[in-house]
Image (cartoon, grey):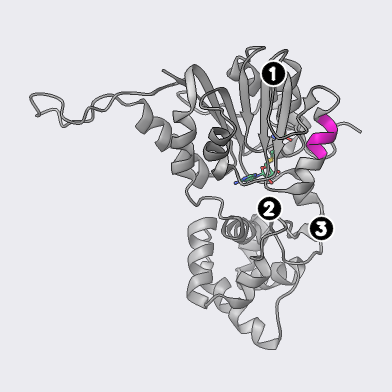
């Protein structure tokens, strides 16, 4: 069946935002199930599609799906009319693209976060709703897991993660309870952790939230996958690689990511930033992008009805000057 792996969010908005040129070079940094990339590939004739995902399952799924639409490069050197799928962290994209001889591109898509497939596969450990090992790795070859963090970090370190990456107001109590619980043996599963979090929260908070452990799971996931590490620098480097007129579309799912995207866009779109009292410009700052979306694009009523996971998606688009 189509799209059981992941339903792409804001698909039409992304595709029209990218203004795809049939001969252009497009980079999808978060392939997932290639929902967005399939539509990009359909619009290319002699163009090139480069896709990244650090999850091998996503690369395999995308290869299967995209091979019905576009030729998949076999020798690792993408040619006109081909797609190359790369199983690496997208933070390495600028240097990998340059090593492929690609100095500039026509469009970039980043659809941050996890895919439905990752969340809905209990053994991946992303969901507090189903029983699984406390794993949460997007890249299953890395050694750091959520289990390691939950069982080995100090109370203070856990509190910091829950507060900074989950904006969890009960971070302190939850961290304390985790450290107490692990004296009885390691915390191994998602449901075990979910129960510890529920017990740490006031009853009315448990009932008022759509999932008591949602923030804690988000925080651990961000920490395990280093989701915010160097995101700002990566975005800046990617913007540098856009051709004039090229578009960058970024979808984020929580305020921590969106804040970074918003601030990079703002910084890159500004002209002179010298204080008004300066007689002449000394900063030499020139804008490198034009922000297309003054406010982020969110899902329509219709999309929300069809895909509840689109509810927190925010799309920001900018154009290289
Ligand atoms: C929301 S899904 C993308 C869904 C995709 N747009 C689609 O329509 O099917 C995000 C994907 O990005 C991948 N991902 C997240 N952060 C990454 C990173 N830093 N490097 C590479 N892949 C990453 C995840 O493994 C996941 O498969």
Dot placed on the residue nearer the N-terminal end, 2 or 3 = 3
Q: Quadrant of ligand 1?
A: top right
Q: Residues within 10 Å of mark 1 (few under 14, many from 20)?
A: some
> What number is the disc on residue 122?
3
Quarter of the figure with the C terminus: top left
Residue 169 in sight here: no
Callout 3 secondary element: helix
**Could you say which disc has been placed on residue 80 in the image?**
1
Residue 125: percent from left, percent from top? 75, 60
Which of the 4 image quarters holds residue 59? top right
Tell me where residue 91 appears, x and y as whole percent. 54, 44
Magenta segment boundaries in residue numbering = 61-65
- For marks 1 and 2, the one nearer the N-term is 1
Residue 35 % position (x, y): 75, 30
Q: Is residue 65 above or below residue 193?
A: above
Q: In this figure, what is the number of numbered marks?
A: 3
Q: Which residue is mark 2?
A: 210
């Amino acid at each position: 069946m189509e799209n059981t792996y992941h339903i792409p969010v804001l698909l039409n908005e992304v595709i029209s935002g990218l203004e795809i040129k049939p001969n252009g070079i497009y980079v999808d940094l978060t392939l997932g199930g290639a929902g967005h990339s399939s539509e990009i590939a359909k619009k290319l004739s002699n163009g090139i599609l480069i896709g990244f995902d650090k999850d091998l399952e996503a690369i395999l799924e995308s290869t299967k799906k995209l091979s019905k639409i576009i030729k998949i490069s076999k020798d690792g050197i993408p040619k006109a009319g081909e797609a190359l799928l790369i199983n690496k962290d997208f933070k390495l994209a600028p240097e990998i693209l340059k090593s492929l001889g690609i100095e500039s591109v026509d469009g970039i898509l980043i659809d941050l976060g996890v895919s439905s497939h990752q969340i809905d596969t209990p053994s991946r450990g992303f969901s507090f709703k189903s029983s699984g090992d406390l794993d949460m790795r997007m890249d299953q070859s890395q050694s750091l897991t959520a289990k390691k963090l939950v069982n080995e970090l100090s109370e203070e370190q856990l509190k910091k993660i829950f507060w900074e990456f989950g904006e969890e107001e009960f971070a302190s109590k939850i961290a304390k309870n985790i450290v107490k619980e692990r004296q009885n043996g390691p915390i191994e599963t998602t449901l075990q952790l979910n129960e510890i979090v529920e017990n740490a929260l006031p009853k009315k908070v448990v009932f008022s939230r759509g999932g008591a452990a949602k923030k804690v799971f988000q925080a651990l996931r961000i920490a395990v996958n280093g989701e915010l590490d160097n995101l700002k620098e990566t975005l800046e480097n990617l913007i540098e690689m856009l051709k004039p007129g090229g578009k960058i579309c970024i979808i984020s799912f929580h305020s921590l990511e969106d804040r970074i995207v918003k601030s990079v866009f703002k910084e890159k779109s500004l002209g002179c930033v010298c204080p008004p009292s300066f007689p002449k410009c000394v900063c030499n700052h020139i804008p490198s992008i034009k922000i297309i979306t003054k406010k982020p694009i969110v899902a329509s009523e219709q999309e929300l009805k069809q895909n509840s996971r689109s509810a927190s998606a925010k799309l920001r688009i900018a154009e290289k000057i």
